[in-house]
Amino acid sequence: MNAEDELELPQLYRHHVFACHTERPPTHPHGSCAASGALALWDRMGKAIEAQALSDVALTPAGCLGFCNTGPLMVVYPDGVWYRPTTAEDIDEIVESHLRKGRRVDRLVIVLKRS
Ligand code: FES
């Protein structure tokens, strides 16, 4: 039995995705995930999660994650995996591999949490 089991709290999500929705003007020196095409990607991810009835996966809009010129950025918890998807196919692969099967998509990872 681990510490979480001892607390007897509800366990809501197997994966919780935070996706950067920050939008800045195109000329802003920091850039932004929205300016990099993020919103269409997150929309696709939300629809895929819903269509596949992944009720133990949450997708939450997030503010700036701090690496703006690298976007679009999203992070999957509790794994602490940061992804930079740029195409619809990337989103489909993250949903199928990571969110459905628990297998990280290494080719799209830009940062991992500290262990
Ligand atoms: S705007 Fe997305 S990480 Fe800063």
Image: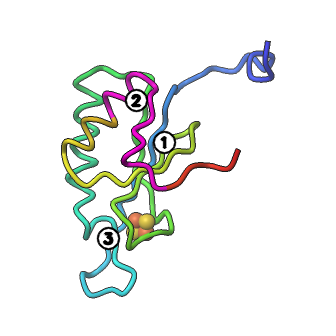
Q: Between tags 3 and 1, which lies in front?
A: 1
Q: Is residue 98 left or right of residue 48?
A: right
* CB under 8 Å between discs 3 and 1: no
Q: Is residue 97 left or right of residue 4?
A: left
- Main SS, magenta region, reads helix
Q: Residues within 10 Å of mark 1 (few under 14, many from 20)?
A: many
Give above or below for 44 relative to 100. below
Residue 21 lies in the magenta-colored region: no
* CB under 8 Å between discs 2 and 1: yes
At mark 1, the secondary structure is strand
Label 3 and label 2: CA atoms lie apart by 26 Å
Label 3 and label 1: CA atoms lie apart by 21 Å
Q: Report the front residue among 8 and 90.
A: 90
Q: Report the front residue among 94 and 28.
A: 94
Q: Report the front residue among 11 and 97.
A: 97
> Where does label 1 land, which residue?
76
Location of the N terminus by quadrant is top right
The residue sitting at the top extreme is: 1
Tell me which numbered mark, 3 or 1, is placed earlier along the sequence: 3
Residue 108 lies in the magenta-colored region: yes
> Where does label 2 land, which residue?
99
Q: Position of residue 74 (x, y in %)?
A: 42, 51
At mark 3, the secondary structure is loop
Q: Which mark is residue 23?
A: 3
Amino acid at the residue labelled 1 = Val
Tell me which numbered mark, 2 or 1, is placed earlier along the sequence: 1
| Residues drawn in magenta | 95-110
Q: Residues within 10 Å of mark 3 (few under 14, many from 20)?
A: some
Q: Position of residue 10 (x, y in %)?
A: 63, 20
